[in-house]
Image (cartoon, rainbow, N blue to C red):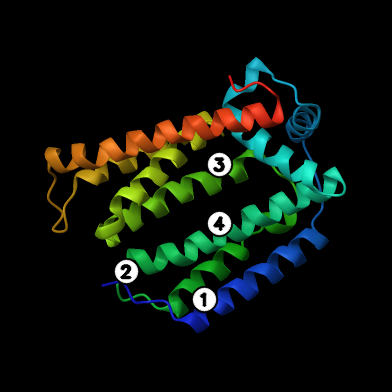
Amino acid sequence: MTQKISKIEVACIVAISLLAIAVLTISAGGPQFSDELAYITLGINGFKDPLILNRYFHVYIQAIFMQLAPKPIIGVRLFWSLEMVFSALMIYFGIRLLNRKATAIHSIVGAFFFFSLPFFLTYSGATIVDFTSMVMVTGVLLFYLLSIRFENKTKWFLLAMGAMLFLSFKTKEVNLVASVAVVGLGLDGEGSFHWKLLWQKVRWTLLGMAGGVVIFMGLGALVVHDPL
């Protein structure tokens, strides 16, 4: 059984995450590339571009942050900060799920390794679509692991996984590679593959994908006033 996370650990995670978001948002730079500026422009003005339809989940989410922030640049920086912190958190919890004997120390090492990567300085505040893709694919894998570890709540995690799969595709088409995780749903606790088990779980994943479609349409109606 995966080691339980104590209340003290949860409190520390929340406090450090909030501090990291604040520090990263304040110290972040800004857009560096023309495609970033194009997505920002589309989000601010509520325009649709048929040439980048598989980038629009990124456009929609970033647009919401820009609309809620006092200034668009602050929203962009906050969006980037949240992407970085959420990625680190998913790595933190993913390590605990991958190995039943993993402790907080292992997770902290993994999170520190992520924050040590050079792109934090090179692309500070740059909301390139690849960062959003990173969050989405990591989310798909995390929900896959959760569905395996907590069988009593498998259906809910599979629904979330399905939604993340669809929305990851609407972030960048190459994220279809994350769908390979669906094959793993057919594996039982001993590593044997069963088609019946796969179908039982895929049904909930497909239902989650339908939910992802509804979420995407809702965001479209909110940002560009067109659910389609």
Indicate left or right for 34 with 142 as reference: right
x and y, in percent, of residue 33 in the image:
77, 36
Q: Residue 99's mark? A: 2
Q: Nearer the viewer, residue 3 or 11?
A: 11
Residue type beneath disc 1: Val
Distance of mark 3 from mark 1, alpha carbons?
26 Å
Q: Secondary structure at mark 3?
A: helix
Q: Secondary structure at mark 4?
A: helix
Q: Secondary structure at mark 2?
A: loop
Indicate left or right for 219 with 108 as reference: right
Distance of mark 2 from mark 1, alpha carbons?
19 Å
Residue type beneath disc 4: Ser
Q: Nearer the viewer, mark 2 or mark 1?
A: 1
* Earlier sequence position, callout 3 versus callout 2: 2
- Tell me the residue at 55%/31% (across/down): 216
- Tell me the residue at 78%/46% (across/down): 68
Q: Nearer the viewer, mark 3 or mark 1?
A: 1
x and y, in percent, of residue 177 in the image:
41, 36
Residue type beneath disc 2: Asn
Q: Quadrant of residue 190?
A: bottom left
* Earlier sequence position, callout 2 versus callout 1: 1
Q: Total number of numbered labels?
A: 4
Q: Quadrant of residue 218?
A: top right
Distance of mark 4 from mark 3, alpha carbons?
10 Å
Query: For mark 2, does the 10 Å Cα neighbourhood hold few (<14), some (14 to 19), or many (20 or more) residues?
Result: few
Query: Residue tagged by mark 1?
Result: 10
Query: Residue tagged by mark 3?
Result: 133
- Residue 174 visible in the shown view: no
Q: Nearer the viewer, residue 102 or 13?
A: 13
Query: Residue tagged by mark 4?
Result: 87
